[in-house]
């Protein structure tokens, strides 16, 4: 598989995503500079974490206007999988490719710690390899990860089974204390209607090797890879 | 606007003595003009010239076969870590700016040290910090201390998180002596290949000099001079004029662009514009290369209208770099900096005159011999005399100190004492995992970071073939010890740092120190400095940790008095194999708890309670001679411990420091954090009766801070191996208990203390959040109004 | 340096539905400091854009467009501005 | 719920002499998006405080005091406000 990892000014988890794709999972990938405008030859797109444009104005607000984002829209429109991690999630929301917005953490403080994730929707290119009931342990690192959307949107997300991950405790319960930022319905990640564009605040690329304390995040990338294989098999 | 006339008052205002002024006239062969006076005043400030400390710094051990760039040569030292890889690291202070504006002061401190590292051609891969504030509990001054503490922490978070570098370790202490004069020391470590080392030298006559980064404003005018004065309302007031504001976004772009440019070898020399900005970077690069440099100020990008040459030369606007480019290669600078949308300007060239010539619209506004300006600052051998307070300190005895009536309660107070309590309120605000290298995160004795191919600057030859490396890092200084015995206290700062490395399984590679002291003109305060350096130098030599660089911050005193002398020491160590990486918390039920080292130091009349946390926290006394450190014994302990770890005998290792055995044992039981709100608590049952006689009193046994002690846990089958081998190595070793259960139980003679782990954990984990006004309520509130 | 003849003054505030923890924190802080009796506090953004020329009308369209596209996020924010 | 009879409307902006990275970044973004000709951009804070009663004068002192003490950071920011 060939992964594009977008690189905006002050993206800073771009290398990490590339590391996991290439060195941990053995796929090919390359950093795609935000001023480029083609994703030709790419099987999947990862919009990595970081502080694109310093998070100035609003997180992701300026990055969404970079030339590469037009290519991302087209790539997504053709059904290509796009995964936004942390700042990447924020950019996707700002770009309107995902509903809702990410606002300031309730604590008003940046939070970096491991959290537990319950996988809700298992029908998606990103959750296929996570078996029923498995609780993922993955780090977060953000100051603006509080997911907000109006009632109608939330209802629709639930109805269409588009909530991919929710913050939970070690036992899988969706408690207040397990919610690190005040996200509505403990939402940590969602996908679009077509299910090929997803975003999440936690960092699976930081939890893909045992030596870093957890390899749970790998399941998300592996799920994506095998989904792509299936897709190609069909195409062939 | 015309320059003011050079009067004695003006010279004095610039912090220059009449003798220094005469020396300047000697160098120039005439009176300096206003701009030149400003240039000399910053370059000859303590911060840039080390005029009061250079003789002391010369006594540090600075050599080892691993040293590639030594202390004083460049912006940071560089140490070989094998396989053609090297690390560059350095610590710097930003104390006074943080007192004036905690958020921006701390943020720009982080920015400054990161620039010092990528200036060397290294990719910055992690930062640490060492912080000191007044007490944060209660009312009155505490409110302001909390403001400073909170501001500094969010400033560090703001800069480091946005830049995308893990803040992977640090230390925080609270003491009244830092009220109004907090300490903010920032450390950065970078990685590079030997052949990638860049030099801060203006080499090659005719080579163009480029300015890259944001435009120059009136920010932090003469900050270096400000840092070289006592902190008074007036000096702070001046500084408020234009506080430096950090832009981590800009720094990230400047860093990436510089590393990309360095990979083209179009660069002849490079230096950041830190303290004393354009002034320091131009004259230092020329001095290092033995060349001259000529710049035209009208070409310097400017943010404010009508800036004078004086202001442009002394501005400390952040995120700027000076780059000397090989002539003919100018286009590569343009190409790369345009790609990153960064401002750049060609402002001058290298000459062979040995002079720093500054022009403004063609007219010469400064013409100074670069080497004399950079290297020939006056050097002072200050008078030193032992402080009077030490007499009482030495005479202090435990006799009048009531024995603890309730040690069980004392331990609870101790671990909830902000200085000892968990610092998660601080490090959970720092991204300590970005870059996928954080193997041991904040919360254990030493942090461990993995160096891999993408830790290197781009263009590293065969980067993919890089073998992973594991570097352990720690920064330490118990300033109460240093206050009570500067020599012994400084030794202990190094010994504790080295012990932390050993507990992680690492061998020291090198040290960097930040000498935070008060006014050197006061002989008693200078004596503290001199004795501390003696202790640091001796200990660094002993642990084979050459000093690769550091920083001096003097004049740390507010109107209410001097700070405790605080020589913070950061140590970097190498861990041979990933399987040797060791953490401090107990692992498995049934494991044996073993104390390496002697439970009690019988040579110490105060049995380790002098200057101890217990004496301060439970008795409100900061006095008594601190524990002594027998370096030979300490080294034996480290070697033995590393040996055991490398044989796979050790499951956990935790060094005993503040709070003594009892606090260390508690931390072994409660310090493993699985995830948010999810600690892993594991109890232990321990018997210390064997030490009671030697300790004389129970509180000394439990809370005494004798040095050279480590608590390890091993599988039951390995007990004998560890204890016997330790004895053979002439090292005290006692099997003191067993891991397991839901409580910590410590027995000593007929006394037994029991603590519920969840209670201990709550006290320890939440103490600082409570002192700061816990955010929990808001934190878990939904994103919508009820 | 371009001369600024007019200024667009833009105020961006969080929608009522979105809880504004900053406002809440400021309110608590104010009450703790003894500013008794104050009501709810709302915290938003203020932007000032220097504009050349004299044709306020022409700019009004552009600024409104910019507010809508980038300077505010309609999902969570409302904006208003004046040009003077 | 206390009734809000008046409101203090407070604008906090970075001092002119102080670097405003956010403003500069927004300005660049707007220019790149084709809003040609705009001048400098400054980004600050906007606060609205609901005030009970009718005595604007009494509040004016308190708000000014609060702006100075906690609502703005006098080291790098300046503020202005109206009560209406
Ligand atoms: N406390 C110290 N111990 C050892 N070396 C020091 C100390 N203080 C300063 N130095 C060295 O003196 C040189 C000049 O220091 P400094 O001005 O802080 O460097 P920079 O110009 O990067 O700020 C540096 O190489 C620094 O490492
Ligand atoms: Mg420097």
Image: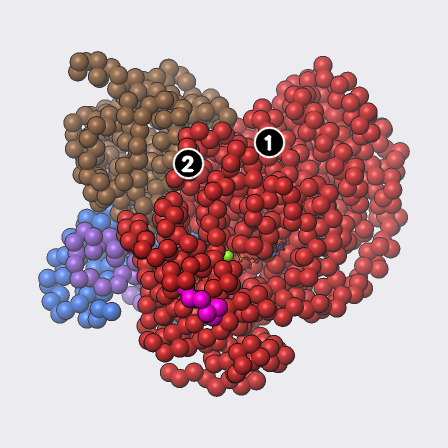
Chain colours: A brown, B red, C blue, D purple
Write down the residue under mark 2.
Answer: B461
| Secondary structure of residue under mark 1 | strand
Q: What is the span of residues highlighted in magenta in the rendered image? A: B350-355
Q: Pointer 1 indicates a residue of which chain?
A: B
Task: Give me the residue at 85% from left, 44% from top.
Answer: B604
Task: Please rate how many residues cluster around mark 2, counting C-alpha atoms within 10 Å: few if below 14, some from 14 to 19, many from 20.
Answer: few
**B352 up-or-down from B152: above or below:** below
Position of A219 with respect to B519 (left or right) is: left
Q: Residue B109 carries which label?
A: none
> Between disc 2 and disc 1, whose residue precedes?
2
On the picture, is B277 further left or further right than B529? left
C1 above or below A220? Answer: below
Asked whether the beta carbons under mark 2 and mark 1 sit within 8 Å of each other, the answer is no
Residue at image location 33% in from the left, 36% down from the top:
A48
Badge 1 crowding class, 10 Å Cα cut-off, few under 14, some 14 to 19, many 20 or more, is many
- Residue displayed at 22% across by 17% down: A231
Image location (x, y in percent) of residue A37: 19, 39
Q: Position of residue B198 (x, y in %)?
A: 46, 49
Residue bearing mark 1? B575
Q: What count of labels does the image hold?
A: 2
Residue toward you, B198 or B712: B198
Secondary structure, mark 2, is loop
In percent of width and height, residue A143 lies at 40, 43
Task: Work out which quarter of the rendered image holds the N terminus of chain A and state it.
Answer: top left
| Coordinates of residue B104 in the picture (x, y in percent) | 46, 57
Tell me the quadrant of ligand 1.
bottom right
Residue A96 in view, yes or no:
yes
Report in which chain the residue with disc 2 lies. Answer: B
Residue depicted at x 30% and y 39%: A7
Same subunit: marks 2 and 1: yes
Magenta span has B782? no
Q: Quadrant location of residue A149?
A: top left
């Amino acid at each position: 598989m060939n992964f594009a990892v977008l690189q905006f000014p002050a993206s800073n988890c771009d290398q990490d995503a590339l590391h996991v794709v290439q060195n941990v999972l053995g796929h090919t990938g390359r950093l795609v500079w935000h001023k480029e405008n083609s994703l030709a030859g790419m099987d999947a797109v990862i919009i990595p974490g970081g502080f694109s444009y310093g998070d100035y104005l609003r997180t992701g607000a300026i990055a969404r206007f970079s030339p590469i984002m037009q290519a991302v829209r087209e790539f997504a429109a053709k059904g290509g999988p796009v995964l936004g991690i942390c700042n990447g999630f924020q950019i996707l929301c700002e770009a309107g490719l995902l509903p809702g917005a990410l606002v300031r953490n309730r604590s008003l403080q940046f939070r970096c710690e491991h959290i537990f994730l319950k996988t809700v929707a298992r029908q998606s290119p990103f959750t296929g390899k996570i078996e029923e009931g498995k609780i993922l342990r993955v780090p977060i690192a953000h100051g603006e990860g509080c997911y907000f959307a109006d009632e109608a949107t939330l209802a629709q997300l639930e109805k269409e089974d588009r909530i991919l991950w929710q913050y939970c405790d070690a036992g899988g319960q969706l408690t207040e204390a397990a919610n690190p930022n005040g996200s509505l319905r403990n939402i940590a990640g969602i996908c679009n209607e077509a299910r090929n564009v997803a975003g999440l605040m936690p960092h699976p690329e930081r939890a893909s090797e045992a030596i870093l304390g957890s390899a749970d995040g790998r399941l998300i990338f592996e799920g994506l890879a095998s989904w792509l294989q299936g897709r190609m098999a069909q195409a062939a | 606007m015309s320059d003011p006339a050079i009067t004695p008052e003006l010279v004095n205002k610039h912090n220059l003595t009449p003798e220094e002024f005469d020396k300047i006239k000697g160098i120039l062969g005439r009176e300096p003009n206003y701009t030149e006076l400003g240039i000399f005043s910053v370059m000859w400030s303590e911060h840039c010239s080390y005029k009061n400390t250079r003789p002391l710094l010369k006594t540090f051990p600075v050599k080892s076969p691993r040293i590639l760039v030594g202390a004083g040569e460049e912006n940071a030292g560089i140490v070989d870590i094998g396989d053609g890889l090297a690390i560059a690291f350095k610590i710097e202070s930003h104390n006074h700016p943080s007192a004036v504006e905690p958020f921006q002061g701390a943020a720009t401190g982080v920015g400054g040290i990161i620039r010092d590292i990528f200036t060397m051609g290294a990719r910055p891969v992690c930062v640490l910090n060492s912080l000191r504030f007044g007490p944060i509990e209660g009312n009155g001054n505490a409110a302001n201390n909390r403001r400073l503490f909170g501001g500094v922490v969010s400033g560090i978070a703001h800069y480091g998180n946005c830049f995308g570098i893990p803040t992977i370790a640090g230390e925080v202490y609270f003491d009244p002596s830092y009220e109004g004069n907090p300490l903010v020391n920032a450390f950065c470590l970078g990685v590079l290949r030997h052949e990638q080392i860049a030099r801060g030298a203006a080499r090659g006559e005719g080579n163009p000099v480029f300015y890259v980064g944001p435009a120059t404003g009136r920010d932090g005018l003469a900050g270096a001079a400000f840092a070289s004065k006592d902190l008074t309302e007036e000096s702070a007031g001046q500084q408020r004029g234009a506080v430096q504001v950090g832009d981590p976004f800009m720094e990230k772009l400047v860093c990436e662009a510089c590393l990309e440019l360095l990979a083209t070898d179009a660069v002849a020399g490079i230096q950041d514009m830190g303290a004393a900005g354009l002034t320091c970077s131009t004259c230092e690069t020329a001095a290092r290369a033995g060349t001259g440099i000529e710049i035209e100020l009208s070409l310097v990008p400017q943010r404010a209208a009508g800036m004078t040459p004086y202001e442009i030369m002394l501005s400390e606007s952040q995120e700027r770099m000076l780059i000397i480019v090989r002539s003919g290669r100018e286009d590569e600078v343009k190409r790369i900096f345009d790609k990153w949308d960064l401002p750049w300007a060609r402002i001058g060239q290298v000459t062979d005159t040995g002079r720093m010539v500054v022009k403004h619209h063609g007219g010469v506004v400064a013409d100074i011999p670069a080497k004399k300006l950079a290297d020939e600052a006056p050097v002072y051998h200050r008078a030193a005399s032992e402080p009077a307070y030490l007499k009482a300190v030495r005479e202090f005895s435990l006799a009048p100190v009531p024995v603890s009536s309730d040690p069980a309660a004392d331990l609870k107070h101790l671990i909830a004492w902000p200085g000892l309590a968990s610092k998660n309120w601080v490090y959970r605000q720092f991204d300590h995992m970005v870059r996928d290298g954080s193997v041991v995160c904040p919360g254990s004795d030493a942090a461990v970071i993995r160096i891999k191919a993408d830790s290197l600057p781009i263009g590293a030859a065969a980067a993919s073939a890089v073998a992973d490396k594991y570097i352990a890092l720690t920064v330490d200084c118990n300033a109460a010890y240093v206050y009570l015995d500067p020599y012994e206290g400084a030794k202990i700062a190094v010994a504790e740092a080295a012990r932390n490395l050993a507990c992680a399984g690492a061998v020291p590679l090198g040290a960097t120190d930040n000498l935070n002291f008060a006014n050197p003109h006061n002989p008693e305060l200078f004596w503290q400095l001199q004795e501390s350096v003696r202790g640091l130098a001796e200990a660094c030599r002993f642990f084979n940790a050459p000093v690769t660089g550091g920083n001096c911050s003097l004049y740390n005193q507010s109107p209410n008095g001097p700070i405790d002398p605080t020589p913070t020491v950061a140590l970097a160590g190498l861990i041979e194999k990933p399987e040797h990486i060791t953490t401090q918390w107990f692992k498995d039920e049934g494991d044996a708890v073993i104390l390496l080292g002697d439970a009690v130091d019988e040579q110490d009349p105060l049995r380790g309670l002098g200057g101890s946390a217990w004496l301060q926290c439970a008795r409100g006394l900061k006095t008594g001679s601190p524990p002594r450190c027998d370096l030979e014994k300490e080294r034996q302990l480290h070697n033995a411990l590393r040996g055991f770890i490398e044989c796979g005998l050790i499951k956990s290792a935790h060094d005993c420091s503040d709070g003594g055995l009892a606090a260390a044992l508690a931390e072994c039981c409660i310090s493993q954090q699985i995830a948010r709100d999810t600690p892993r608590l594991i109890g232990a049952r321990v018997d210390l009766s064997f030490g009671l006689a030697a300790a004389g009193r129970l509180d000394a046994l439990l809370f005494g801070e004798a040095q050279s002690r480590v608590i390890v846990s091993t599988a039951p089958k390995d007990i004998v191996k560890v204890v016997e081998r330790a004895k053979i190595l002439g090292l005290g070793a006692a099997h003191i208990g067993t891991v397991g259960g839901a409580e910590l139980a410590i027995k000593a003679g007929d006394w037994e203390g029991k603590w519920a782990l969840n209670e201990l954990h709550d006290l320890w984990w939440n103490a600082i959040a409570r002192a700061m006004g816990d955010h929990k309520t808001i934190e878990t509130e939904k994103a919508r109004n009820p | 340096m371009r001369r600024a003849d007019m200024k667009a003054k833009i105020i961006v505030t969080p929608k009522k539905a979105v809880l504004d923890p900053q406002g809440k924190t400021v309110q608590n802080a104010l009450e703790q400091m003894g500013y008794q009796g104050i009501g709810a506090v709302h915290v938003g953004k203020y932007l000032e854009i220097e504009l050349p020329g004299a044709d306020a009308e022409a700019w009004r369209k552009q600024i409104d467009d910019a507010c809508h596209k980038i300077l505010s996020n309609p999902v969570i924010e409302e904006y208003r501005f004046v040009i003077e």
